[in-house]
Amino acid sequence: MQGPPDHLATILLVEDDPAEVRLLQEAFNVISVRTQFYVVSGGQAALAFLRHQRPYPHALWPALILLSLNLSDMTGQQLLAELKREPVVKTIPALVFTNSQSPQDIRESYQLGANGYILKPFNFTHLVEVVQAIAVYWIR
């Protein structure tokens, strides 16, 4: 069941690979969940967005943060640690969305406060299924 037609889910996507960004946006379009994506390519930009610093002084508060572990300026775990230190920001669900199946990465992400750890699917059909599950559990 979808939310009311005027409901728009705001998602902060922290991902530096434009192809991954495009695929995620397409997958959300397929499942017909109205979303407003804000895409930042690094951890420092994500922190600036959430702190309403330049160049994001009027950024909308996200309902969900999807973040990659492999960022250009810091690791996803470093970003998680920063996010979860800030009282207001730590209440936003943060999902790690990565290719890493490393038990150490999984354990560390959860220890730092990740609300979920999701492996990036290898094909678009599976990506749509994953995005559907994210929408049902975290957005709707």
Image: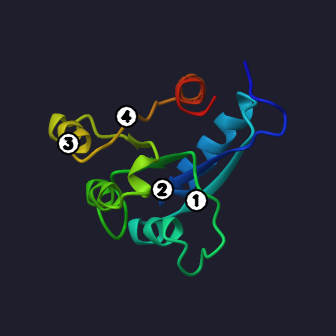
Extreme residue toward the bottom, this view: 54
Q: Are marks 2 and 1 in contact (CB under 8 Å)?
A: yes
Which of marks 4 and 1 precedes in the sequence? 1
Q: Which mark is residue 111?
A: 3
Name the residue: 55% across, 72% down: 52
Q: Circle 4 sits on which residue? A: 116
Which of marks 4 and 2 precedes in the sequence? 2
The image shows residue 46, relative to residue 102, as above or below, that is below
Give the alpha-carbon distance from disc 2 to disc 1, as whole Å: 7 Å
Badge 3 crowding class, 10 Å Cα cut-off, few under 14, some 14 to 19, many 20 or more, is few
Which of marks 1 and 2 precedes in the sequence? 2
Examine the image and state in which quarter residue 101 appears.
top left
Which of marks 3 and 4 precedes in the sequence? 3
Tell which tag, 1 or 4, sits nearer the viewer.
Answer: 4
Q: Are marks 2 and 4 in contact (CB under 8 Å)?
A: no
Q: Are marks 2 and 3 in contact (CB under 8 Å)?
A: no
Tell which tag, 1 or 3, sits nearer the viewer.
Answer: 3
* Residue 11 on image: x %, y %: 59, 48
Give the alpha-carbon distance from disc 1 to disc 4, as whole Å: 19 Å
Q: Circle 2 sits on which residue? A: 15
Extreme residue toward the front, this view: 87
Badge 1 crowding class, 10 Å Cα cut-off, few under 14, some 14 to 19, many 20 or more, is some
Q: Label 4's element?
A: strand
Q: Circle 1 sits on which residue? A: 39
Q: Label 1's element?
A: strand
Between residue 52 and residue 40, name the one nearer to us.
Answer: 52
Tell which tag, 2 or 3, sits nearer the viewer.
Answer: 3
In the rendered image, which quarter contains the C terminus? top right
Q: Is residue 110 left or right of residue 57?
A: left
